[in-house]
Amino acid sequence: MKRIAIFPGSFDPITKGHENILRRALPLFDEIIIAVGKNSSKDNYFPLEQRVAWLKQVFANEPKVKIEAYTGLTINFCKKMNASYILRGLRTSADFEFEKAIAQNNKVMADEIETIFILPVPELSAINSTIVRDIIRNGGDASPFVPSGIDVKSKS
């Protein structure tokens, strides 16, 4: 059976932390689907098309990585994609508590799907998309926090 993982998130924008977690997870799975969530109750800073394009750019040379947009429950998307794993990064203890609750509820809804947590390397643990967006909004240089080649200076 093929080991397929879903790596869900808004990736608004993708950060070096996201990239690091995914690249370190690649040896564990046959395929990783980066699932870019379309959340109608959340205003994203960058349009969905831009976020997907950046992800495709960053992982262009990774044949095991696919990028898909989705709506609704991640657990339902996993079933649709025949994925048995959800991949999540944990930066802080607050992340752990939040992600643990989601993982436990997902387990109730779909016992066959496991959530796998990966810690970022220490030098990337302080990076998150919210801080990167704030840097961008205020005219700062976000390039140290996003993958090489990603231009987040504007919303284009």
Image (cartoon, rainbow, N blue to C red):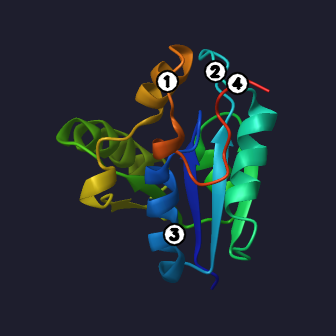
Disc nearer the start of the sequence (2/3): 3
- Is residue 35 left or right of 28 when viewed as pictured? right
Disc nearer the start of the sequence (4/1): 1
In this figure, which residue is indicated by the disc labeled 2? Answer: 45
Disc nearer the start of the sequence (4/3): 3
Label 2 vs label 4, nearer the camera = 4
Residue type at mark 2: give it: Tyr
Label 4 vs label 1, nearer the camera = 1
Residue type at mark 4: give it: Ser
Residue at point 62%, 81% (across, down): 30
Residue at point 69%, 51% (across, down): 55
The answer to whether the residues at label 4 and label 1 have Cβ atoms under 8 Å apart is: no
Disc 4/disc 1 C-alpha distance (Å):
11 Å
In this figure, which residue is indicated by the disc labeled 4? Answer: 154
Local secondary structure at mark 1: loop
Disc 2/disc 1 C-alpha distance (Å):
15 Å
